[in-house]
Image (cartoon, rainbow, N blue to C red):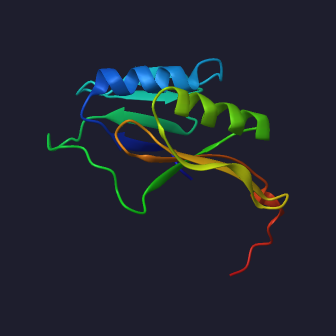
Amino acid sequence: MIAYTMLGTNDKDRAFAFYDSLFEGTGIKRLFKTPKGGQFYGKAPGEPMLCITSPYDEGDACHGNGTMVALQCDTTEEVDAYHARALAKGAANEGDPDWRAPDMFYGAYFRDLDQNKICVCKTNFAAIPVKN
């Protein structure tokens, strides 16, 4: 359902360095730039992507209260590694890696250098019965 998520920054070079480092060795890479110099990250075009860019209206980027991006991981070890790497690169801890729902959701939280809230998680949402 999600094609891409966009996060604003006031310092693209700093933000790109942070995300380049965060995604190093994960298979996620820079895919292409926006016309205004933003950067799309992902595994491949056509898969979910994350865009880091300055706001289109040229105003200051600011984080949204209650807004969060969740990045799916394949293993709990990958969650741990992302969280540790983010903190080592200057991100603020918003929640250590832990099981939030046994066998359903293992996640960790941080705020990037622009205060955007990011969750890295290993989920088993497919096991939850759909209720209308």
Residue 128 lies, in percent from the top left, at 79, 67
Identify the residue at image location x=41%, y=20%.
Answer: 17
Closer to us: 123 or 107: 107
User: Is the C terminus in the top left, top right, bottom left or bottom right quadrant?
Assistant: bottom right
**Which residue is most to the bottom?**
132
Residue 122 lies, in percent from the top left, at 73, 47
Residue 75 visible: no
**Which residue is most to the left?**
58
Q: Is residue 81 above or below residue 102?
A: above
Q: Is residue 92 above or below residue 34?
A: below
Residue 66 visible: yes
Q: Quadrant of residue 79?
A: top right
Residue 118 lies, in percent from the top left, at 51, 46
Residue 65 lies, in percent from the top left, at 37, 61
How many numbered marks have been drawn onto this rendered protein structure? 0
Q: Quadrant of residue 99?
A: bottom right
Identify the residue at image location x=38%, y=35%.
Answer: 113
Q: Is residue 74 above or below residue 2?
A: above
Q: Is residue 103 above or below residue 20?
A: below
Q: Is residue 120 left or right of residue 90?
A: right
Closer to us: 30 or 100: 100
Q: Is residue 86 left or right of residue 100?
A: left
Q: Is residue 12 left or right of residue 122?
A: left
